[in-house]
Every structure is written in C-alpha cells, then in structure tokens.
Image (tube, grey):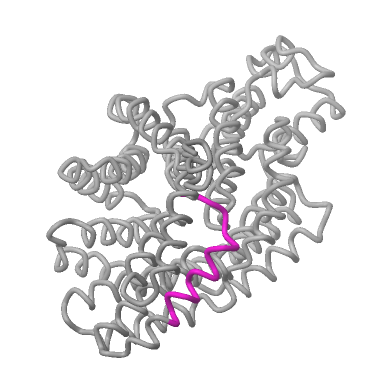
Amino acid sequence: MEEEQLGPRLRRLRLEAGLSQTALAGDDLSPSYVSLIESGRRRPTHEVASKLAQRLGVSVTMVLEGREPASTQAATLSLNLAKLALTDGNAPEAEAKFRELLADESLPQSIRDDAQMGLARALENEGDLPAAIGTLSPLYERAVEGRTGVPITTLGIRLCRVYLDAGDLHRAVDIGEQALALASERGLEGTDDQLRLAATVMAAYFDRGDLNHAAAFADKWLPVAEQVGSRAGQGSIYWNAAIVAEARGAIDEAARYSTRALAHLSEGDDTRDLSRLRVACAWLWLRLDPPEVDRAVGELDKARADLERWSGPVDVAYWCTARAQAAILQGRAGDAVQLAEEALSRLGTHRGIETCQARIILGDALIASGQRERAVAEFRSAADLLRALPSGRASAESWRAIGERLQSTSESEAAEAYRQALDDAGIRSSVASLDRVADVVA
C-alpha cells in the first residue's frame, strides 16, 4: 500500500475536521501557505506543524508522519471502551471512563473533544440534563469560534436537543438558528447533519408554540431534503413535518410523512433516534380519529428494548406513557395504571412536561378503573407541576387536557386550566373586563 504523503494527508485531516483552508490557517498563517503544503510544494516546520495539529485536533506526529504516538493509541482504546459502555447502556461506567480521559490534558484535542461529547451523552442518558448542558456548552462555543474539529452542526444538534429535553425552548431555538447560520457560512449545506439540525430547530419552534415558524421550516427544508439529503436527513425532516401537519389538522399528510420518516430512518444506524421516532409516531397514531391502536402498539413494542439500552429514563418513561394510553384505548385500565406508574417511577424527581403528561394519563387510567378521587388528585398534581414550567405548545395542550378532565369536578379549576392553556398558546385577553364595560355603559 502506497504511503500517504504529507500534503494529501493534511488535506484529508482538514476535511475530516470540517475546516476550510482559511480556518486552518488561522490568524498567523495564510490560506495560500496551507494550500502550498497540501499540494506538496512546502513542508511545514515543526512549529507550524504544531499549530496545524492543534487546530486539527490531532498530534504533531500524525501531521508529519501519519501515525499517532503510543500514548495516543492507548487513549483511543480507552475512548472506544467508554463508547462501548455507553452503547451497552452502562452510562455510569461510560461517564467514569470519559472523565478519566478528560483529566489527561496531554492528550490530543480531538480525543478530548470526543470524550467531552461522550460525557455529555452519558450524563444525558442518566437524566442529568443541566450537567449535560454544562459539558456541551464550552465545546459548542469553541465550535462557534472554529477551535474544534467537531462540526458545528453535530454540536448544534446535540445541544439543541438537550435544551429541548430540559424544556428551555427559547434557548434551543437560539442555538439551532445560530448553528444553521454558521453551517451555511462554512459550506455545510445539504449535508445530513444540516438537515437533522434543521429538523431539530423545527421541533423547537413547534414545542415553543410557534406553529408559523415551524410550518415555514417544513416548507423550506422538505424540498432541500428531497433533492440533496441522505435518507437519515430526509427522515428527520419528514418526521417533524408530520408533527407540524398534524397540528395544522392535515392528518392524512401527517400520516404520510410519518410513514416516510420511519421508512428512511429504519435504514440508518442511529438506533436511539429510530426508537424515539417509533414512540413519537405511536403518539401521533393514537391521536388520530379513529386512533390506529394496533399500529401504534406495534411500533412501541419494537422500540422498548432499544430505549432501555441506549436512552435515558425520560425516553423510557415517555414510552411507558404512550403504552399506557394505548392500553386505555384497548380497554385494559389495570395495565394502563401500572404503565403510567412505571413512567412516574422512571422519571423520579424530573419536573418536566413528561411528568405532567404521565400524571394526566395515570388519571385517565384511574378513571377507567373506577378510581375517580385518585384520578382528580393526579390531575391537580399535573397542574401544580405545569405552573412551574415554561409556556409552549406542549404545556398549552396539557392545560387543556386538565381543564377537560376537571370540568365535571370543579368549574373554577377547569376555567383556570383553560385560561392557562390560552396563555401558554400565546392567546391573551384583549377585551375589557365586564366591570370596565359596565362603567363605560353607565
């Protein structure tokens, strides 16, 4: 096998890092000098090679000789073992291994960045979303500044998703929009990660209750996905377009897009995303009129094992809540109660929208099993949780659900729930109070 020369090797490393010649040159070298090195017409000094290696996130030995030193090879092995632990569902073990790698400041930046990404994923799987955000944010800021080989799209997707799961919808939108703009500036248009990032931003707008922006994203990115996207990127866009279509009342269109999304993502290797999509599709099918219960249960049953292995407690709890809803529709109230209670057990101290939804479904299951007093207590607990959460479409829907369920029990509580639903949907009162009208008429 012919040995790779320094110039072609530098170009390969630069492209793998997602850097342009200008970005690799930085402030102290010229892009034309980098071009001369890549074309084989210049050989860098050790000092220049060190600068290039730092920006590429590799060792100087890799730049000059095409190999990593023994210490780096050992670290790469440790990194792979940490990733295997994460894949096997052992997040605590993975976290310990990633932290051990990050403690060694002598390692190449590429390995440290990879370990930092892995640590954030482990923390996310353990349900510690604030710590995951704190781990990802410094790496994302370095990507904004062009000081890491991790593409801005990759980090944008991860950080945007964690903010979404944490309920900080405005920050999720800000991060996603910034990452999309930088991706365009850096020539990453039409890539799989750009489409997945666009789909994530679409989801953030939707969850925030901004259906107009979400619909505009769907209209913009569907043609791009169909023209240049990979099947994974297309699947992400199709799925979020399905959610938007369902919200707009276009149920047939939503079902068509969701079916396409599953077909596309089933061919990929991102098992976690596929299992989460199966759950999301099941929720959509359970909300159809009439609901497609058997189809939803089929997808949920396919997703459970992968969620247990690759995802955190929030994702598994969301599965339990969806399965409980299906059990209610199947007339199996006892099973539904057990599944909803398992969801709450998985969520533990988590105070997000998933906990509110699990309590509402538990209340429905209790009513179906004849335990009305317990059910009302669950609806009221869900309302207490909702008051502390940010406004958005999901919270508005939950408030409406609570209002509908409390109508026959307490008119004042039901009215308050409906008012909260309107507020969270961004619909505020613009009509004078009856007292003010009476004063004017008098």
Instruction: Residue at 42%, 43% (x, y): give it.
Output: 206
**Image quarter for residue 142?**
top right
Instruction: Give coordinates of residue 315: x percent, y percent.
Output: 44, 66
Q: Is residue 398 magenta?
A: no
Looking at this rendering, what residue extends furthest in the right direction? 47
Q: Can residue 397 be seen by looking at this rendering?
A: yes
Query: How far from the left and from the top, in percent, is residue 225?
Result: 33, 30
Q: Identify which residue, 33 or 182, lies in the foreground.
A: 182
Q: Is 118 situated above or below 364?
A: above
Q: Nearer the viewer, residue 414 or 325?
A: 414
| Foreground pick, 139 / 245 | 245
- Residue at 35% from the left image edge and 61% from the top image edge: 275
Looking at the rendered structure, the number of numbered marks drawn on it comes to 0
Residue 16 screen position, x and y as percent? 57, 34
User: Magenta: predominant secondary structure element?
Assistant: helix
Where is residue 384 shown, x and y percent of the image?
54, 71
297 w.r.t. 73: above or below: below
**Relative to 145, 422 lies left or right:** left
**Outermost residue toward the top?**
32
Residue 305 visible, this angle:
no
Compared with residue 162, is residue 32 higher up or lower down, i.e. above or below? above
Question: In percent of the image, x 22 and y 44: which residue is there?
Answer: 254
Q: Which residues are magenta?
A: 377-392
Residue at 38 percent across and 28 percent down: it is 216
**Residue 390, magenta (yes or no):** yes
